[in-house]
Image: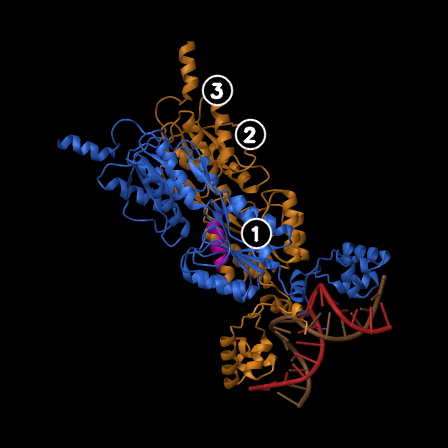
Chain colours: A orange, B blue, C brown, D red
Amino acid sequence: MDGLSRPVRSSSITLRDVAGVAGVHYSTASKALDPTKERLVSLATRARVREAAATLGYRPHLFARGLRRGKTGMIGLILPDIGNPYIPPLVRSLREVLEADEMTAIIVETEDDDRRLVRALDSLAALRVDGVIAGCARIGDEDRLEEFDREVSPVVLAIRRLPGSRLSCVSADDVAGGELAARYLVGLGHLRLAQLEGPADVQPFLDRSEGFSRALSAQRRCELLEVGERAAHPSYDEGVRLAHALIGRGEPMPTAIFAHNDTMALGAIDALHSSGLRCPQDVSVLGFNDSPLAERCTPALTTIRTPSGEIGRRAAAAVLARIRGEEVGDQLTTPALVPRRSTARALAVGPARPPSSSRRKVTVR
Amino acid sequence: MDGLSRPVRSSSITLRDVAGVAGVHYSTASKALDPTKERLVSLATRARVREAAATLGYRPHLFARGLRRGKTGMIGLILPDIGNPYIPPLVRSLREVLEADEMTAIIVETEDDDRRLVRALDSLAALRVDGVIAGCARIGDEDRLEEFDREVSPVVLAIRRLPGSRLSCVSADDVAGGELAARYLVGLGHLRLAQLEGPADVQPFLDRSEGFSRALSAQRRCELLEVGERAAHPSYDEGVRLAHALIGRGEPMPTAIFAHNDTMALGAIDALHSSGLRCPQDVSVLGFNDSPLAERCTPALTTIRTPSGEIGRRAAAAVLARIRGEEVGDQLTTPALVPRRSTARALAVGPARPPSSSRRKVTVR
DNA sequence: CTGAAAGCGCTTACAG
DNA sequence: CTGAAAGCGCTTACAG
């Protein structure tokens, strides 16, 4: 009678419709269509129901099913920035694992902003996601994330670990990555080095710093030059800014720079370039992550690979396990050095200087 | 009794719980909490219900509500590739508009693969999304997309129009963009030009080709060199490949190249570079889209801006309108030229040639 | 202004 | 093997 209150689209085919065509009760149709329950239904009925479903184009209403079963089949994926080239491969691998379990990922972005995180968590709670993969954790987020884990659904950390939290985490071994960076550059003969550090509220950057400077201090004669500040965001623009800060100090330039991610490394290379310094001839630059753009730039970027595919797969498997009620431990993947063109042997001769400053000295003297 | 079948988490606070604490029927609680219905409830009750909801931390179960109301609050966003730097800004702007209407976007990727499109549409149908924004349309997808629009929920096209379809579309005016590219390069004095074309099953690339070559043929003395093939994907790698194809022909090089998107332009620049040709001194390169990386590379890329923020917002507004039952027309946004460092005046002197081939000629002669 | 009932589309014990 | 019933959490006519 009330045409307006009914769904308009033809394809809101329901189990009732299927059952009607097949001539059975809709609960029987439900069982016939459920692989785990089909054995409760006679072969003949099964066939009839399936045919009816096929000809009608029936699709189970996932959220109706979810409501009944007490789950939604949705996983929240909280990311700081989907524009970071490291992210898409990770999202893809993660989604593959989720989809194999009929789960769908909902991506929300925080842009490393507190209020956005709160809002993201709010919506995911209202959506009743079955679990969350948080790739956005900043030091200080422990409580919020753990509360969600306690009150709504399981949360696992990915990429960014949170030492002060009991939430399990899948990430790279960033300390080892920093060490690897240092040892490689030292092996190339570099004695004066610097690092462009990511924000201090993100543990991986702290870890990379620690690994790098620790491995360096184990070497005699190696000097770690201070940039004086860290990046506000681990972005190209900040890479440019910090590199210029380094150049502008007036002190001798390092012969090698370790940037805390690939994007900052690209910024640094372009900044060097625009200051008349060549990479790698004057200054070697080493990135971190091995995101897709690392091999697609000039010079191709030497970097530390932190396998995003594997981290994505493991993180997905970890939430799925926690949803099943299993406990999962932390998982660190081992980073690997990928040598390309942006690093070179240190020259035996004296320190490179920004052309302008060396020119200045020449004219002054 | 049966502890196992009930939700475990404390926060599955339901309307019943709230009503219990407030001492009212749960239907009354529902009204008290609904801004559009709160006037049906006495002030005192309203206050009590709200307080109960707040102290219990009640959140409406969005999918339960959706089931009752016949909508889910979800919009499917079908994209070929979230790794394309043009995409994140578009996703962000689009999401802003959707969120203002309490809608959530579900992103699925097709990688321009037929089977993935089918699967994507399948899942979105099972999710009963209220609408779809398809940024993945390839020529030939008309039927599938229109069927979804007819049977499941409204589909609007974004970025890629589909001339053979009645689905409404929000995109850039790609023909005008191609013309703009041609006129700009001609204005710089270039007489021998080439374009690196994207796949022929994507209308925007066809449009860019058409605009470019049409504007060029209107000029006397301008020559459009044939590359001989199009890109299989509009990617960096294909940009590299096509540029090498151009260089390897043995014919004189163009002095300006129009790449059908920024990513291909970057590939082309790197390919030129690795062949000893400088951009822009030897060859100017013009991109398309003005994705974020265009201003963050060396040389900064001259490109055609097709405002992703605006396209995203309009596309979101368009689905929302269609969901409300309104018809919406096609919308073309006007592209604009963004001059940067990768293009320069054509030299008055003779054609640039790949160094190797010119060297060869020198030694041979 | 409040409550009781029906129902969104499904699943799942429970009878027969 | 099949069906009838209850219920997931909500909203919304409909009575009172």
Query: In percent of the image, x 16 and y 30: which residue is there?
Result: B362
Choose between A210 and B170: the one closer to the eye: B170
Label 2 element class: loop
Three-letter amino acid code of the residue under disc 2: Glu
Where does label 2 land, which residue?
A: A229
Query: In percent of the image, x 46 and y 43: which residue is there?
Result: A289
Label 3: chain letter: A
User: Looking at the image, can residue A169 be seen?
Assistant: no
Query: In percent of the image, x 49 and y 65: which residue is there?
Result: B147
Three-letter amino acid code of the residue under disc 3: Gly
User: Looking at the image, can residue A195 be seen?
Assistant: yes
Q: Is residue A110 placed above or below B168 in the rendered structure? A: above
Where does label 1 land, which residue?
A: B316
Q: Main secondary structure of the magenta part?
A: helix
A90 within the magenta span: yes
Q: Which residues are magenta?
A: A86-96
**How packed is label 3: few (under 14 Cα within 10 Å), some, or many (20 or more)?**
few
Q: CA distance from mark 3 to mark 1?
A: 51 Å
Which quarter shows the C terminus of chain B?
Answer: top left
**How packed is label 2: few (under 14 Cα within 10 Å), some, or many (20 or more)?**
few
Q: Quadrant of residue A185?
A: top left
Three-letter amino acid code of the residue under disc 1: Ala
Where does label 3 land, which residue?
A: A250
Label 1 element class: helix
B33 within the magenta span: no
Q: Are marks 2 and 3 on the same chain?
A: yes
